[in-house]
Amino acid sequence: MQIQELEVRHLHTVAEWLHGMNEQDKHYVAWLASDPNEIFEQIWTLTQFHEPLAYVAWENEKIIGFIGILPFFEQKLCRLLGPFSTKKGTDVIEALWDKASLTVQLHFDAVKVACFKANHDLVAFAERHNFNLYNKEKTLALHHSRFSPSSKKEEQIEEIQEHEYNELRELHPSGAYYTTNEMIELADNDVNKLWGYKMGGRLEGYLYFELITPDEGEICFVNVHPSAQGSGIGSALIEHALQYAFYVYDVEIVTISVRTNNEPAEQLYENIGFVEIHTIYAYEKVIGLESNDTLLH
């Protein structure tokens, strides 16, 4: 086995390999793009830094493992793409982590990784290295064919503007897998949308939507001010996002995630027509601190 930095000449091969791996629940890792072309762009970015941010494990010119580091330098936070391995045992995973952890320790205060429960190798890796399970979320899906749009028009819903970012930070949960700044940065992409429900000059709620592939969209976050909960704002935001996804982007499916202990939100989504498809486990390790210390969100 050889562990090498990801090279540009191998990008297409590695992107195709990663796409095939992430299509399997037993290997699925969150934050990796869904489409092979998008994966190519994602890992190409990792080759453009001075520090190595991606490694490939090879055996007789065959890929047997990969790990990537998605950097958020301003927040001193990184997210792991992997480690992936096609081999049984821990040798490949640990060899990849040995390489990547040097960069992680030098440049970041915290590292996160998330996967399906079925990815036993990655769950075991996180537990072995004293990552903390900080979030557990169900993912639910709604197909276009099951969506019945409302005829009501919500004029209070508009895209969030820069002067509203402070109000947005007050609404966004600290334990979310994207920080407020990360979400704002991602919303700069034309296909992603950050909508707010505005009433009386105040931001009462928001929804962040991403176009994952031409056929799939994701409602990543929807939150409402505590004083306005139960007033239908969350439902209005979701309805707005679904109409946009199905009739503007023409997607086939929209997914949404909910923490497993948030029964009211889960019931709301199910009433709209969403059905559960899987659960994601998110882990975090604060560099230089023991696993039972306060988490950095």
Image (cartoon, rainbow, N blue to C red):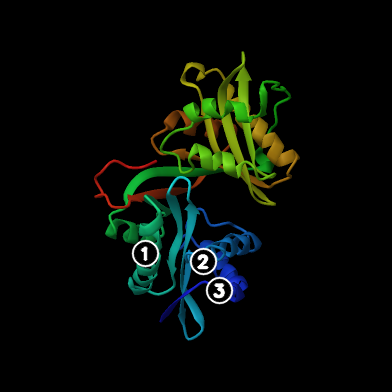
Query: Helix, strand or loop at disc 2?
Result: helix
At 55% from the left edge and 66% from the top edge, which residue is drawn?
A: 47
Question: Few, some or many C-alpha atoms within 10 Å of disc 1 (few <14, some 14-19, many ≥20)?
Answer: few
Total numbered labels placed on residues in the image: 3
Q: Do the residues labelled 2 and 3 touch (CB within 8 Å)?
A: no
Residue 10's place in the image compared with 246, above or below, is below
Tell which tag, 2 or 3, sits nearer the viewer.
3
Q: Position of residue 56 (x, y in %)?
A: 48, 73
The disc label shown at residue 21, or none: 2
Task: Identify the residue position indicated by label 3 in the image.
Answer: 7
Q: How many angstroms separate mark 2 from mark 3 (CA)?
A: 19 Å
Query: Helix, strand or loop at disc 1?
Result: helix
Q: Can residue 221 be seen in this view?
A: yes
Query: Helix, strand or loop at disc 3?
Result: loop
Q: In the image, what residue type sits under mark 2?
A: Met
Q: How many angstroms separate mark 2 from mark 1 (CA)?
A: 25 Å
Residue 138's place in the image compared with 89, above or below, is above
Q: In the image, what residue type sits under mark 3?
A: Glu
Q: Where is residue 247 in the image (x, y as percent from the top left)?
A: 75, 39
Q: Position of residue 144 (x, y in %)?
A: 68, 42
Question: Few, some or many C-alpha atoms within 10 Å of disc 3 (few <14, some 14-19, many ≥20)?
Answer: some
Left or right: 63 with respect to 132?
right
- In front of the other: 147 or 69: 69
Q: Are marks 1 and 3 in contact (CB under 8 Å)?
A: no
- In front of the other: 109 or 123: 109
- In front of the other: 137 or 173: 173
Q: How many angstroms separate mark 1 from mark 3 (CA)?
A: 19 Å
The disc label shown at residue 102, or none: 1
Q: Image quadrant for the C terminus?
A: top left
